[in-house]
Amino acid sequence: MFDRLPTARASRRAAPLLCVLALCIALSGCKKELYGNLSEQDVNEMVVALLERGVDASKDTSDAGKTWSLDVDDTQMVRAMEALRARGLPHSKFDDLGALFKKDGLVSTPTEERVRFIYGTSQELSSTLSKIDGVLVARVQIVLPNNDPLAQTIKPSSAAVFIKYRRDSDIGALVPQIKTLVMHSVEGLTYDQVSVTAVAADPVEYSQQPQSSGMPAWLLGVLAGAVVLAATALLVLARRGVLAGRPGADAAGGDGAASGRLGGLLARLRRLRPAN
């Protein structure tokens, strides 16, 4: 019985240590939110871009899919930011004409309506150009002069387009098509009055990926769960007395009782034996 007591004590001491080990394993694979309030399309593109670069990323939602968040291993935050910046993610948010001219019960002046229309058209064109493969940033600035109908000379409309693109993309070949698209989107605009400035993005030098997180997050979770189960099993067994040797103690107690009864019987036989 007594030789098994150290085993029981060791089991009780090992269980908390195993729990601490499981906690350390779980924390080693912790993820932190890198971006929030994303659409499902944006978060899917970002997850794919990060996985292609070897960054452990996942998506999560807390409002039944209305908005999404991007979660990244906390040891890979820098590399994740570099990978997303190289791909121009997340995409910029643009306003649309429908939202800008949504009726709100207020009467706008003609000047306000004009400014709102110019801004909305610029936003729509910027959104369209940003969807071209290889384009990281697209901005369109439109100038529509307020010409006097009685004036002798009319100031022409103009538009300036700025595009930042990846170096592996041939945006130069698309400049004529871009100018044509902008020209037909703005009233009174001619082809020659549209300027396009295309700038190649600097190559991204990725930082060295840390080696501290050698296991995927799912494998760390499985390992932590196994350690917790092992600790729980040790506690249950020690509490029930399996490791404490209680069955052996019961057997020893039974042997002692049997020996006592046998000794008493022999003593009675000696008293009944006639003396020589």
Image: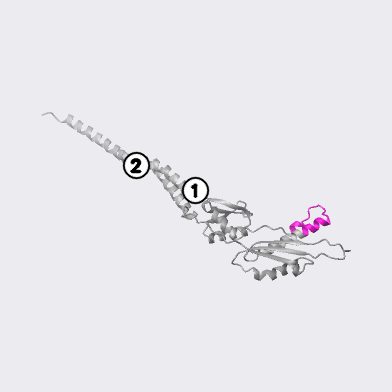
Q: Which amino acid type is shown beneath numbered disc 1?
A: Leu
Say which residue appears at 46% left-offset and 47% top-offset: 24
* Mark 1 crowdedness (10 Å alpha carbons): few <14, some 14-19, many ≥20: few
Residue 97 seen in render: no
Q: Nearer the viewer, residue 245 or 202?
A: 202
Q: Which residue is mark 1?
A: 27
Q: Is residue 104 magenta?
A: yes
Q: Are marks 1 and 2 in contact (CB under 8 Å)?
A: no
Quadrant of the image for the C terminus?
Answer: top left
Q: Is residue 252 magenta?
A: no
Q: Nearer the viewer, residue 139 or 35?
A: 139
Q: Position of residue 118 (x, y in %)?
A: 77, 60
The span picked out in magenta is 98-117
Query: SS at mark 1?
Result: helix
Q: Which amino acid type is shown beneath numbered disc 2?
A: Thr
Q: Which mark is residue 7?
A: 2
Say which residue appears at 22% left-offset and 33% top-offset: 263
